[in-house]
Image (spheres, rainbow, N blue to C red):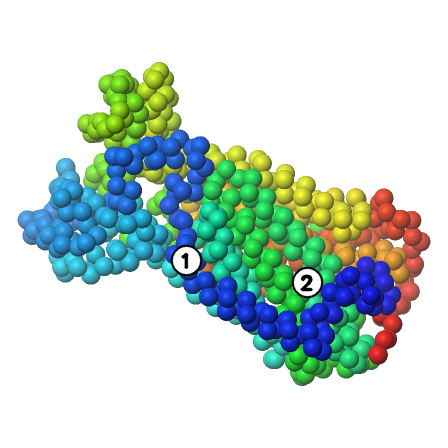
C-alpha cells in the first residue's frame, strides 16, 4: 500500500475499524471467548484422535496396505506382539527359566495378554538368553494407549532375578517407546514455546506487554486444536508429528504476526494521541504483509495434499487450520486486547506522541549503511558463504532411520532388539506375511524356497479362497538387507500368474513408506515453489523481486540442510527419514519467506516515496528488530523439538531452526538488502516502480512519517 494518509473508507480501512472500535473491540473479545468455549472444549480430544499406525499413513494403493487389509480375515486387527527378552552372558540358569515362567504366568492373567497364544520361554542356542513371544490385545489403541498397557504389564511382573537382564521389545515394545516419548511432548512444547515467546517479548517490549500476545496465542492454540479434532471427522489424518507441528506453528507464526503488528502500533502511537486511531492505522498498514505471510504458509501446507503418504497429506490441513486460526486471532483479538489495555502496556517505555522511534537510529540502520558501501561485494560474499554451508549436503542421505536408531538415548525396546540380534533369529517377533489366492498356495511356497535370506516359514492358513503365509527374515526387520529381501520376495510371488500375492508386514510397510516419500518429494517441492512465488508476485506486483527472493530462500534451505547434517552427526543421529528434506523444505520456504515479505513489502512502500535504494535502508532500519525477534521466536519454538527423544522430531527441529535463523539474520538483513541496493529500482520489473528516479543514499534523511496526523 502506498497511501500517505489513513484510508478509513476503503475495504481494508473498514475492516481495520472492527477490532479497534470503541464498542466493537468488546464484541471481538466476546466472540473469541465464545469460540474458545464452543470449539476449544474439543481440544482435549485431539490426542485420542491421532493415527500413528504406520500402515494407516500409507496410501491405499501401497502393496503393504492392500496386504494388511487382505490379512484381516486371518488376523485380529487389534492384536500385536511383544517380545520378552532375558539375557545372562554367563549362561541362563534354571532359576532364570523359572523366573521367565513366573513372568508368563503372571502376565497370562492380564486382560491385555492373549494367554493361549503365548510362546516360550525359548532358550537361545548359545544358552545365554531366553525369549517369550507375548501376543497383546491392543484394542486398536494409539501409541500412548499401548504405552499404558506396557506400564500395566510391568507392574504385574515379579521382581527380577539378580544379574538377569530383562527388556520388552518387538512391535509393542517400540510402540510403547513412541507413546512414552510423544506423551511428554504436549506439555513440553507448550511450556517451551511460551517461554521463548515471553523472553523475546520481554526483551522487545518490557515486562507487561508480553501477556497480550501470549494470551492471544493460547486462544489460538486451543481453538485450532478443537478445529483440527473436528477435521478428523472428515477423515483428515492427524499424527503425533502433525499435532506437534500444529502447536509450534500456532505459537511461532502467531507470535511473528503479533510482533509485526505491535511494532507498527508502537510507531503509530508516537504519531497519534487516540490509541484507537493508531491501532486502526497500524492494522491497515501491517495487514497486507501479515496476510501474505499467512497465505504463503497456508499454501505451502496445503501443498501436502498432493502427497501419496496419508500422514503427509494430513499434515497439510492440520497446519493450515492452525495458521488460519492464528492469523485470525492476531488481526482481531490481539488488536482488541491492545486497544482495551491502552498505552500503559508498553511500560516502562511509553511511546509518547512526538517521540522518536528507537529503530530509526538502531543497529539495523548501521548495518544497512555498512552494506550500502559495497552492496555487490556483500551479496556475492554472502552467497559464497551460504554455498560453502550447503556443501554439507554432499553425501547426505535421507534413506530412512533404522527402528533401533529412532530414539535419542537409551530405549528398552532397542536394548531388547540388540539382545535378540545376538542370540536369536532377529525376525521372530516381527514377521513378514503373504496373502493371495488359495489355488496357488503351493506355487507361492515353492517360490519362497528360492528367495535368499528368508528364515523359517510357517504352514499356510487357508480361508474363503485366500491363503496366509507368515515367515521371518534372516536380517533385522528394519535393515536395508531386509528390505531387499522383501523386494526379492515380491518379485518371486508376483511372477506367479493368478496368485494375486501381496507381501506385507512391518518391513514391507517401511519400504513402501520410503518409496512414497521419494515420490512426494518430487511432486510437492516444485508445487510449493510455484505457489509461493505467485503470492509474492501478487504482493509485490513484480516478477524479478519474487524470483530473487525465492532463490535466496532455496539457497538458505540447502545451507541449513548442510549445516544440520554436521549437527546430526555431532548429536550421534544415525540416518534421516526420507520425508525430512520435504518437510524441512516446505516449512522453511513457507515460513522463511515471511521475513522477506515483512521486509520487501516495507521496501516497496518506502520506494514509492524515497526510491528503492533509500527505501531498502529505511525498511531495514524499521523492520530489523521485529524481524529478528520474529525469527528468534519461530526458530526457538522449532528448536524445542530437538530436545525430544524421537530422532526424527529432533532432526526436523534442528533443520527448521537453523534455516529460520539463517533467513532472519543473514538472508533477509544482508543478502536481500544488498540485492536491493545493487539492483535498485529494476528489482520491481516490470512494474512502473522500476522506472522511479532514485534519491541519493548520502543524504541524511529521517525515515518517513508515513501518515499525516489525523488527531
Q: How crowded is the residue under tag 1: few (<14 C-alpha within 10 Å), some, or many (20+)?
A: some
Pinpoint residue 458: horizontal percent, then vertical percent: 20, 29
Pinpoint residue 436: horizontal percent, then vertical percent: 31, 25
Residue 195 visible (yes or no)? yes
Q: Nearer the viewer, residue 515 or 302?
A: 302
Quarter of the image for the N terminus: give it. Answer: bottom right
Point 84% across, 79% down: residue: 711
Left or right: 596 in relation to 584: right
In the displayed structure, 558 sits above or below 605; it is: above
The local secondary structure at tag 2 comes to helix
Point 55% across, 53% down: residue: 319
- Residue labelled with disc 2: 627
Q: Nearer the viewer, residue 563 or 635?
A: 635
Please tell me how many numbered marks the rendered image carries: 2
In the displayed structure, 554 sits above or below 624; it is: above
Q: How crowded is the residue under tag 2: few (<14 C-alpha within 10 Å), some, or many (20+)?
A: many
As drawn, which residue projects farthest toward the top? 497
In the displayed structure, 163 sits above or below 441; it is: below
Left or right: 99 in relation to 343: left
- Residue labelled with disc 1: 47
Q: Quadrant of residue 31?
A: bottom right
Amino acid at each position: 500500500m502506498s497511501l500517505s494518509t489513513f484510508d478509513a473508507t476503503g475495504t481494508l480501512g473498514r475492516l481495520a475499524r472492527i477490532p479497534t472500535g470503541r464498542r466493537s473491540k468488546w464484541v471481538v473479545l466476546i466472540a473469541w471467548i465464545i469460540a474458545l468455549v464452543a470449539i476449544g472444549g474439543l481440544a482435549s480430544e485431539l490426542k485420542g484422535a491421532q493415527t500413528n499406525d504406520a500402515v494407516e499413513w500409507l496410501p491405499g494403493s501401497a502393496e503393504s496396505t492392500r496386504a494388511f487389509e487382505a490379512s484381516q480375515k486371518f488376523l485380529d486387527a487389534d492384536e500385536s506382539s511383544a517380545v520378552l527378552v532375558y539375557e545372562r552372558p554367563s549362561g541362563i540358569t534354571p532359576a532364570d527359566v523359572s523366573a521367565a515362567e513366573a513372568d508368563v504366568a503372571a502376565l497370562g492373567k492380564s486382560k491385555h495378554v492373549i494367554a493361549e497364544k503365548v510362546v516360550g520361554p525359548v532358550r537361545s542356542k548359545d544358552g545365554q538368553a531366553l525369549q517369550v513371544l507375548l501376543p497383546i490385545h491392543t484394542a486398536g489403541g494409539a501409541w500412548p494407549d499401548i504405552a499404558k498397557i506396557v506400564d500395566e504389564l510391568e507392574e504385574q511382573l515379579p521382581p527380577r532375578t539378580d544379574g538377569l537382564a530383562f527388556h520388552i521389545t518387538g512391535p509393542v515394545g517400540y510402540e510403547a517407546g513412541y507413546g512414552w516419548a510423544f506423551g511428554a511432548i504436549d506439555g513440553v512444547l507448550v511450556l517451551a514455546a511460551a517461554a521463548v515467546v515471553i523472553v523475546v517479548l520481554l526483551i522487545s517490549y518490557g515486562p507487561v506487554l508480553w501477556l497480550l500476545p501470549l494470551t492471544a496465542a493460547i486462544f489460538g492454540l486451543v481453538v485450532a486444536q478443537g478445529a483440527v479434532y473436528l477435521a478428523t471427522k472428515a477423515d483428515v489424518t492427524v499424527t503425533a508429528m502433525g499435532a506437534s507441528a500444529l502447536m509450534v506453528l500456532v505459537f511461532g507464526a502467531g507470535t511473528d504476526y503479533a510482533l509485526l503488528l505491535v511494532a507498527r502500533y508502537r510507531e503509530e502511537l508516537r504519531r497519534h494521541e487516540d490509541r484507537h486511531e493508531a491501532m486502526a492505522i497500524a492494522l491497515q498498514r501491517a495487514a497486507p504483509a501479515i496476510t501474505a505471510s499467512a497465505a504463503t504458509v497456508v499454501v505451502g501446507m496445503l501443498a501436502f495434499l498432493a502427497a501419496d503418504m496419508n500422514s503427509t497429506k494430513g499434515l497439510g490441513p492440520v497446519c493450515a487450520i492452525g495458521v488460519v486460526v492464528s492469523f485470525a486471532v492476531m488481526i482481531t483479538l490481539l488488536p482488541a486486547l491492545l486497544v482495551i489495555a491502552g498505552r500503559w502496556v508498553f511500560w516502562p517505555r511509553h511511546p509518547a506522541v512526538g517521540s522518536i522511534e528507537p529503530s530509526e537510529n538502531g543497529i539495523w540502520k548501521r548495518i544497512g549503511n555498512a552494506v550500502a558501501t559495497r552492496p555487490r561485494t556483500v551479496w556475492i560474499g554472502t552467497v559464497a558463504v551460504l554455498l560453502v554451508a550447503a556443501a554439507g549436503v554432499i553425501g547426505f542421505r535421507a534413506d530412512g532411520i533404522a527402528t533401533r536408531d529412532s530414539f535419542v538415548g537409551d530405549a528398552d525396546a532397542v536394548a531388547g532388539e540388540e539382545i535378540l540380534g545376538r542370540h536369536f533369529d532377529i525376525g521372530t517377533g516381527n514377521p513378514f506375511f503373504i496373502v493371495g489366492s488359495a489355488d496357488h498356495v503351493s506355487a507361492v511356497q515353492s517360490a519362497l524356497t528360492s528367495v535368499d535370506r528368508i528364515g523359517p516359514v510357517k504352514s499356510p492358513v487357508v480361508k474363503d479362497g485366500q491363503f496366509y503365509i507368515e515367515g521371518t527374515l534372516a536380517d533385522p526387520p528394519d535393515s536395508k538387507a531386509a528390505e531387499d529381501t522383501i523386494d526379492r520376495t515380491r518379485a518371486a510371488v508376483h511372477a506367479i500368474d493368478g496368485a494375486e500375492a501381496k507381501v506385507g508386514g512391518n518391513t514391507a510397510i517401511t519400504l513402501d513408506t520410503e518409496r512414497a516419500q521419494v515420490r512426494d518429494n518430487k511432486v510437492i517441492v516444485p508445487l510449493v515453489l510455484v505457489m509461493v512465488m505467485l503470492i509474492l508476485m501478487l504482493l509485490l506486483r513484480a516478477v524479478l523481486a519474487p524470483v530473487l527472493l525465492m532463490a535466496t530462500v532455496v539457497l538458505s534451505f540447502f545451507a541449513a540442510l548442510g549445516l544440520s547434517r554436521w549437527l546430526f552427526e555431532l548429536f550421534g543421529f544415525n540416518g534421516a527419514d526420507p520425508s525430512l528434506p520435504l518437510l524441512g523444505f516446505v516449512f522453511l520456504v513457507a515460513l522463511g519467506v515471511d521475513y522477506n515479505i515483512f521486509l520487501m513489502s516495507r521496501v516497496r512502500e518506502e520506494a514509492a516515496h524515497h526510491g528503492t535504494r533509500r527505501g531498502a535502508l529505511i525498511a531495514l532500519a524499521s523492520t530489523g528488530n521485529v524481524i529478528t525477534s520474529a525469527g528468534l521466536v519461530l526458530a526457538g519454538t522449532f528448536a524445542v523439538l530437538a530436545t525430544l527423544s524421537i530422532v526424527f522430531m529432533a532432526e526436523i527441529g534442528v533443520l527448521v531452526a537453523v534455516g529460520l535463523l539463517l533467513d532472519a539474520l543473514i538472508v533477509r538483513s544482508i543478502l536481500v538488502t544488498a540485492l536491493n541496493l545493487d539492483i535498485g529500482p529494476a528489482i520491481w520489473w516490470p512494474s512502473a516502480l522500476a522506472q522511479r528516479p532514485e534519491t541519493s543514499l548520502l543524504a541524511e534523511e529521517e525515515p518517513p512519517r508515513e501518515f499525516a496526523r489525523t488527531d
